[in-house]
Image (cartoon, helix red, strand yellow):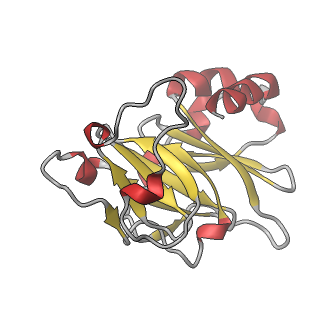
């Protein structure tokens, strides 16, 4: 099962067995035709649905969670659900993070960085949870998820980041090269 998040905040579900096989010479399957009379939309994110939760980060410091477990049942034939992400804030979404990795690393426009344990982001899908308070004139520009092993390579004292939210500062000996490698790998 593949799930798409569209520009209207809806979740669009595609069962792989419903899509025709294309030869290498064909362009592929035109998705709007698959969804029957759906209005115009732009695909913002694609996720392979396999028993996971994803967090969608907004530039104002809020995060929303989609639990893809509800889409996993092969018995459910619904192709579209309007209750994805709030359409009023969809233009502020900057990216997604996997919540099963353990940690979320955030970077702001003004260069501040913070680490949050992802277990603190357990809300219903339509709720926006405040993850970080950004200062006036600042906004979240980058987000990525990391495992505990990644955290060991990222900062000198990873224990300081367990149990909540912490801003990264100079004494943490932040490994910028490792961070850049992780972010590029996620794209």
Residue 156 in picture, x, y percent from top left? 70, 24
Residue 136 in picture, x, y percent from top left? 82, 73
Task: Name the residue rendered at 33%, 67% in the picture.
Answer: 81
Can you tell which quarter of the image residue 29 is in? top left
Res 172 visible: yes
| Residue 20 located left or right of residue 163 | left
- Name above or below for residue 80 compared with residue 49: below
Task: Name the residue rendered at 55%, 66% in the picture.
Answer: 41
| Residue 154 located left or right of residue 38 | right
| Residue 3 located left or right of residue 7 | left
Residue 71 in picture, x, y percent from top left? 26, 51
Q: Nearer the viewer, residue 40 or 155?
A: 40
Task: Name the residue rendered at 49%, 69% in the picture.
Answer: 128
Residue at the left extreme, as displayed: 75
- Name above or below for residue 19 compared with residue 40: above
- Name above or below for residue 183 compared with residue 91: above
Res 117 visible: no
Query: What is the count of numbered marks?
Result: 0
- Name above or below for residue 92 compared with residue 184: below
Residue 140 in picture, x, y percent from top left? 73, 58
Q: Nearer the viewer, residue 174 or 28?
A: 28
Residue at the bottom extreme, as displayed: 88
Q: Quadrant of the C terminus?
A: top right
């Amino acid at each position: 099962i593949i799930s798409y998040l569209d520009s209207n905040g809806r979740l669009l579900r595609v069962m792989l067995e419903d899509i025709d096989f294309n030869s290498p010479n064909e362009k592929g399957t035109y998705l709007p035709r698959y969804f029957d009379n759906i209005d115009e939309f732009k695909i913002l994110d694609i996720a392979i649905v396999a028993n996971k939760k994803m967090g969608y980060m907004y530039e104002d410091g809020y995060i929303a969670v989609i639990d893809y477990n509800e889409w996993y049942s092969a018995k459910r034939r619904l192709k579209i659900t309007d209750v994805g992400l709030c359409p009023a804030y969809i233009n502020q979404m900057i990216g997604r993070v996997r919540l099963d990795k353990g940690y979320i690393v955030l970077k702001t426009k003004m260069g501040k960085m913070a680490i949050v344990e992802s277990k603190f982001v357990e809300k219903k899908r339509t709720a926006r949870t405040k993850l970080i308070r950004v200062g006036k004139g600042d906004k979240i520009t980058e987000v990525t998820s990391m495992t505990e092993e990644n955290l060991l390579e990222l900062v000198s004292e990873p224990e300081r980041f367990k149990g909540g939210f912490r801003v990264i500062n100079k004494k943490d000996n932040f490994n910028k090269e490792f961070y850049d490698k992780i972010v590029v790998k996620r794209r």
